[in-house]
Image: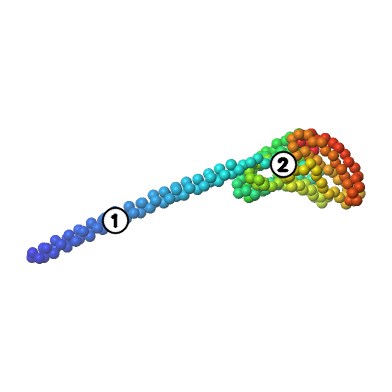
């Protein structure tokens, strides 16, 4: 009887230890699962903070290199059958704010609404829609202003007369970088006696300019020459 009592006591102790161990496991398992979300939240927060710092450095880099640039086109015209458009091409991965400005033939200034061109994208403006019925700006010159890297923004002015199958396009250039010489040359051609040619001249700076135009034939005979003075932003 004594041995049976001893075995019964030992078995009861083993059962108690087993139950205690099982209960302890049940208590520890929820704790192990509840600690993981906290760790995941911490890791996600660290990742967001790291991304925020990276974006801040990128924005800071863009702001540090935001040099002012002005691109210009010598001549534009709207009206009649012409569809005149200005295309702006942003070659950077960041959005660019562009300020287009029109100048009438007499030098009056018209600032259009700023345009935001998305990164690695382009935007096209219909100048007729922008100008409306304003008679002073049916023709003249234009320029666009932006801040950013050199050659970050490209521009092209296009005038299309679909009824006559005519097209004229001009790439916008930065006068400070392109016009280092005081002499400009170009080629002209009239396909028939009924054709006409117009020469548009616009000063590349804000002060007046004194110019001499000369027209030559292919055999080097000078047809005509004229001298005139251009005032600020006139064409």
Q: Is residue 103 left or right of residue 62?
A: right
Q: Is residue 15 left or right of residue 208?
A: left
The CA distance from mark 2 to mark 1 is 78 Å
On the question of residue 207 being in view, the answer is yes
User: Could you say where residue 55 lies in the image, as x and y percent from the top left?
Assistant: 53, 46
7 shown above or below 210: below
Label 2: how many residues lie within 10 Å, few (<14), some (14-19) or many (20+)? few
Q: Residue at x 32, y 55 (%)?
A: 29
User: Could you say where residue 128 lies in the image, as x and y percent from the top left?
Assistant: 75, 42
Disc ID at residue 26: 1
Question: How does the figure colour the protein chain or chains?
Answer: rainbow
Q: Residue at x 72, y 41 (%)?
A: 176
User: Could you say where residue 170 lies in the image, as x and y percent from the top left?
Assistant: 76, 47
Q: Is residue 43 left or right of residue 9?
A: right
Q: What residue sits right under mark 2 in the picture?
A: 176
Q: Considering the image in quadrants, where does the C terminus appear?
A: top right
Q: Residue at x 43, y 50 (%)?
A: 43
The first of marks 2 and 1 along the sequence is: 1
């Amino acid at each position: 009887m004594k041995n049976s009592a001893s075995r019964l006591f030992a078995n009861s102790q083993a059962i108690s230890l087993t139950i205690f161990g099982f209960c302890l496991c049940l208590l520890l398992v929820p704790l192990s699962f509840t600690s993981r979300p906290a760790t995941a939240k911490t890791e996600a927060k660290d990742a967001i903070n790291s991304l925020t710092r990276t974006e801040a450095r990128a924005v800071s880099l863009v702001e540090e290199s935001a040099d002012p640039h002005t691109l210009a086109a010598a001549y534009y015209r709207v009206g009649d059958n012409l569809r005149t458009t200005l295309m702006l091409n942003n070659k950077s991965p960041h959005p660019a704010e562009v300020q287009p400005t029109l100048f009438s033939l007499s030098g009056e200034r018209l600032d259009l609404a700023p345009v935001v061109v998305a990164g690695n994208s382009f935007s096209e403006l219909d100048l007729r829609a922008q100008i409306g019925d304003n008679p002073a700006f049916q023709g003249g010159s234009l320029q666009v202003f932006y801040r950013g890297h050199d050659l970050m923004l490209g521009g092209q002015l296009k005038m299309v007369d679909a009824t006559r199958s005519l097209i004229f396009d001009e790439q916008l250039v930065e006068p400070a970088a392109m016009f280092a010489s005081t002499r400009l040359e170009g080629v002209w051609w009239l396909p028939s006696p009924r054709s006409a040619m117009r020469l548009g001249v616009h000063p590349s700076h804000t002060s007046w300019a004194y110019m001499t135009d000369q027209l030559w034939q292919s055999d080097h005979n000078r047809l005509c020459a004229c001298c005139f003075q251009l005032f600020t932003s006139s064409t």
